[in-house]
Image: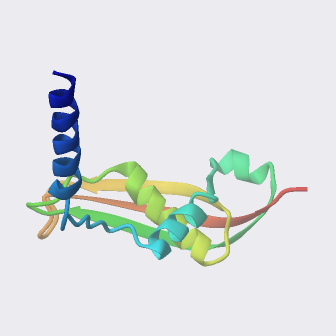
């Protein structure tokens, strides 16, 4: 009886190892996307009052929007702000103050549209 269990275990192990042959995984995570997301995560979101309590300098303004079409998920505030943070990081900032976000239902070819405007800051920590 023990030999049957050993043979069954070996057979299952061989089948398990060969069953996944040729399986491919595809993802949109490229090395540059991961680095960009990490760099953008260094950008801190502040309120207007908070940014003035630090040694900071405004370096520009940024805009981002998201359009929901038929086959896409609805707009999410955090995703639009992540896009803003990425833009701030690209121009050398490390702080952001979101000034306004507007949501429009429907808008042109969009089922829903979320647009946000923010100010980019360089915040110095001493």
Quarter of the image for residue 123 reads bottom right
Quarter of the image for residue 55 reads bottom right
Q: How far across and how far down the image is residue 113, in percent?
A: 24, 60
Residue furthest to the left: 70
**Residue 60 as seen in the image, left or right of residue 11:** right
Q: Residue at 29%, 63% (x, y): give it.
A: 66
Q: Is residue 125 above or below residue 61?
A: above
**Looking at this view, is 34 or 5 the one in front?**
5
Q: Residue at 62%, 67% (x, y): give it.
A: 120
- The colour style of the image is rainbow
Q: Residue at 13%, 63% (x, y): give it.
A: 69
Q: How far across and how far down the image is residue 126, in percent?
A: 91, 56
**Looking at this view, is 23 or 92 the one in front?**
23
**Looking at this view, is 113 or 5 the one in front?**
5
Residue furthest to the top: 1
Q: Is residue 78 above or below residue 89?
A: above
**Residue 126 as seen in the image, left or right of residue 23:** right
**Residue 64 as seen in the image, left or right of residue 35:** left
Q: How far across and how far down the image is residue 44, in percent?
A: 63, 54
Quarter of the image for residue 71 reads bottom left
Q: How far across and how far down the image is residue 75, in percent?
A: 27, 54
Q: Is residue 123 above or below residue 13?
A: below
- Dividing the image into 4 quarters, which one contains the N terminus? top left
Please give the count of numbered marks on the rendered protein: 0
Q: Residue at 62%, 59% (x, y): give it.
A: 43
């Amino acid at each position: 009886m023990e030999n049957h269990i050993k043979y069954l275990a070996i057979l299952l192990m061989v089948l398990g190892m060969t069953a996944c042959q040729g399986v491919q995984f595809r993802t949109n995570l490229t090395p540059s996307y991961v680095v960009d997301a990490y760099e953008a995560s260094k950008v801190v979101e502040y309120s207007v009052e908070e940014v003035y309590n630090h040694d900071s300098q405004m370096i520009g303004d940024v805009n981002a929007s998201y359009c929901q079409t038929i086959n896409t998920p609805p707009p999410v505030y955090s995703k639009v702000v992540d896009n803003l943070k990425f833009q701030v990081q690209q121009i050398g900032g490390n702080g952001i103050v979101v000034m306004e976000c507007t949501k429009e239902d429907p808008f042109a070819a969009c089922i829903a549209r979320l647009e946000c405007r923010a100010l980019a800051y360089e915040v110095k920590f001493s």
